[in-house]
Amino acid sequence: AYSVLVTETVVPPLRAVRSTLRVGVGFSPQPDPVWSVVQAAAIARSRFGAGRPQLALVLTTRVPTGDLVAAVQTEIGPVSAAGGGTSGLFTEHGLERTGSIVVCLGSADGAASGTVMAPGLDLADAGQAAARVMLAGWPFRAHYPRGIGIALASEGMPARDFLEPWRRL
């Protein structure tokens, strides 16, 4: 399992808040997208370790023939899920043209408990729409929300402006 330590300062009162984001990653080269996602989810869950993930990110190279969310939740449990299709996946073995990757995310304070998907004319527009939903719709947050921004875009779409809308809000 991977761990990312997130430290942020909250004002007022002036104090440091620390939480650990836990990550488990699984890959399966199976050509059937549902079977591939099931296998990748099982590997990601085992690498996540103790506790329950709150979010699963799913990327697959094939058009799904079944319900991928149900496949993920069968292996991982009741989690939010997001993802998409891609023409290739980068793994420790190089570029894979067939298969699926599942990434499990979780933290003790529920920081990884929701997903936002937002369309837009470009990545900056979609990023701003997602940021507004997060800021408006997280009633259980104890402090300013934080998140992981992942963008899936068509070829040739400039990605450099994706995070700028988050910084402006």
Image: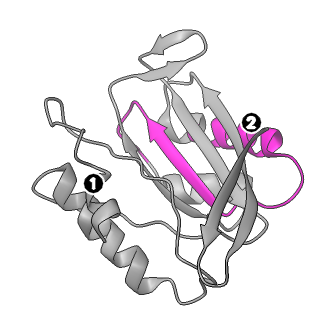
Name the front one of labels 1 and 2: 1
Q: Using the image as rendered, state which of residue 72 and residue 101 is in the foreground.
A: 101
- The mark total stands at 2
Q: Using the image as rendered, state which of residue 123 and residue 117 is in the foreground.
A: 123
On the image, the x and y values in percent for residue 102 come to 59, 41
Quarter of the image holding residue 116?
A: bottom left
Query: Residue 42 lies in magenta, yes or no?
Result: yes
Residue farthest to the bottom, as pictured: 139
Q: Is residue 4 left or right of residue 136?
A: right
The kind of secondary structure element at disc 2 is helix
> Range of the magenta residues?
37-65
Q: CA distance from mark 1 to mark 2?
A: 34 Å
The kind of secondary structure element at disc 1 is helix
Q: Which residue is mark 2?
A: 43
Q: Is residue 118 visible?
A: no
Above or below — where is 9 with respect to 53? below
Residue farthest to the right, as pictured: 50
Q: Is residue 51 left or right of residue 81?
A: right
On the image, the x and y values in percent for residue 135 come to 41, 79
Residue at point 19%, 54% (across, down): 124
Q: Which residue is mark 1?
A: 164
Residue at point 59%, 78% (across, down): 11
